[in-house]
Structures are given as structure tokens and as C-alpha cells.
Image: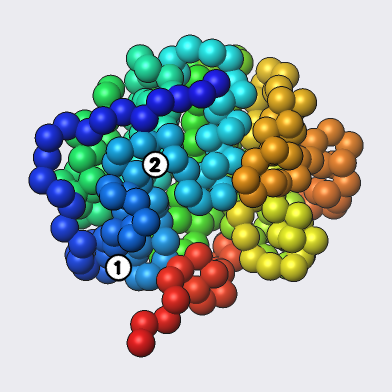
Amino acid sequence: MAGRGTKRRGTARPVPGRYPVRFGLAELLADADRANAWLLTVDEVAQSYVDLDDPTRLEFEYVRRIGDVIDCLADGPLEALHLGGAGCTVPRYVAATRPGSRQLVFDADEPLIDLVREQLDLRAVPNLRVRISDGREGVATRREGSADLVVADVFQRAKMPGDVATLEFTTDVARVLRPAGTYLINVADGPGLKFARRVVATIGAVFPHVVMLADSGVLRGRRFGNVVLVASRADLPVDEITRRAASAAFPSRVTSGGELERFRGNAKPIHDDEALDTPRPPWNVFGLPPRT
């Protein structure tokens, strides 16, 4: 389903610069190749890429995969819940490609969200609300069966908080989703993918249908990178997701069924009472070139 960009309202042009936020020092950088596109970083780790003239432009590989999966879901507007906002790239995409969608974002970094509101025209996104809250606490406030889509892309100081990877939290996400709803979670991991295997085990203990998308180099342990997991209690459009992934500008491998079970191996689900240290990426994997 092709989406059209939406023109932004008449606001002042964003101001490049550095801004203190809760979890570090944010920086807003203009894209030299596009008139109104911006990179948002925190402590030199890339957080979001936002094209204010074309919200359907998804620059980061893993975000493009999330967008492709959303495009493969049943047509029509969505009731969407997003855990982790930053520049709100995915909510902007949903608003542009599925008019009439109603969306709620939970993000714990109030100064960062204030920056995005003022500098990146967040108020112009239709039917989008943002609440300052920890993602897990936010999900706990939602009604049973109130969402078609939950997207978890939560990172603090380059690491995924362990409490959004547990069985107990995943069970609460399932509670909030409608019977045919979809859960998307972005996981970052390195060679061996030990953490990703445990997240697969966790998600699979709650949802009967799970699909994994990742770059082949990441799956083969060649580099640190993103793994996107898609889960539902209903059948997922695996064939369509696979076609999209294969034809993308940055192709990814789609794993499901028995192949995903083999990937999981003997990995066990993650529980709340576990002292979990989530993977930290090597310096600058998701960041900027060193300053000179």
C-alpha cells in the first residue's frame, strides 16, 4: 500500500544544534541532500530520521522493515500504541499511509519530546498523542483489546531496557492487543544473538505466530545490528512480508516456523525477576563519525 507524504503546516524551520535532554545530549542535524529532512541523535547515537516533507521516507533500515510489515497488515486505519517516540518516525508514517489512524506514544524523555514538538512539527501529525511515561507503565494503563498495533522501539543510552523484553510485559502487550492485533519489537544484538534468541523464546511463549526480520550479516554474527520481531495471535502475512523484505532497498531475511524454532534453540524466556543486562552496541555502531 503506497502512501503519500503530507505537507507540514506553516512553522518556523527547525534550528540545528545541541539540546540537553533526560538521557543525554540531543543533537538536531540537517540532511544536506534533502531540503527538510533531519537526523536526531542523543549522545551521538542516531535516534530518528524525520523528513518533514515526506513522512513516508524511512531512512533507517530497521524502520523501513517496520514500515513494510505495517504495509502488509489489513487495510484501513489503525489504533496504534508506540513505546519509545524520539522523532516519532513510525507514527508519522502510519498517519501518512493510513489516514484516520489514532495513535498514542509513550516516551519517558520529556525534554526530548518537547524538542521534537517544537523543532520537528510533531503537533502537525493527525490524531497523535504523546504521553510522558515509561513504556511498561504506559501499557499497564491501556484497556484490554484496545489496540490493533503495538510497536516497541525503546532504547535508553543505546541499550534496550530489559523490562520490555520479559514474559510478564509481553503478556500485558497481548492483553492490550485485539485478537488479530500485531506486536512489533525492535531488538539490538551482536554476534551469537544470545539476547535475540531469548526474546524470540519470550515472544513465542505468548504469541503463536512470530516472524523475524534481520540483515543476513547480523544473523550470521558478522556485526551488531537490529532484529525486528513480528507477533500475533492470528496468522501473519508471511509470504507478503517475505516478498517485501526481498525487494527492499536493504533486503532482509525473514525467518518463521520451524526455522525460527531452530534459531531459538534452547533459549529460555526472560522473566521479571531476572537481573538482565541487555546488549550494548560497540561505540558508533548506530552513531555518527568521530568529531574532528
- Secondary structure beneath label 1: strand
Q: Position of residue 142 (x, y in %)?
A: 39, 25
| Amino acid tagged 2 | Thr
Q: Quadrant of residue 72?
A: top right
| Amino acid tagged 1 | Gly
Q: Residue at x 12, y 35 (%)?
A: 10
Q: Is residue 74 left or right of 118 when viewed as pictured?
A: right
Dot placed on the residue nearer the N-terminal end, 1 or 2: 1
Q: Residue at x 33, y 60 (%)?
A: 32
Whether residue 201 appears in this view of the structure is no
- Secondary structure beneath label 2: helix
Q: Residue at x 34, y 51 (%)?
A: 34
Q: Out of 44 and 13, give the one closest to the viewer.
A: 13
Q: Out of 23 and 173, give the one closest to the viewer.
A: 23
Q: Position of residue 174 (x, y in %)?
A: 57, 27
- Quadrant for the N terminus, please: top right
Residue 24 badge = 1
Q: Residue at x 81, y 48 (%)?
A: 264
Residue 53 badge = none
Q: Position of residue 78 (x, y in %)?
A: 45, 18
Q: Is residue 200 left or right of 285 when viewed as pictured?
A: right
Dot 2, crowdedness within 10 Å: few (<14), some or many (≥20)?
A: many
Q: CA distance from mark 1 to mark 2?
A: 20 Å
Q: Is residue 184 above or below residue 154?
A: above
Q: Out of 6 and 260, give the one closest to the viewer.
A: 6
Q: Which residue is mark 2?
A: 89
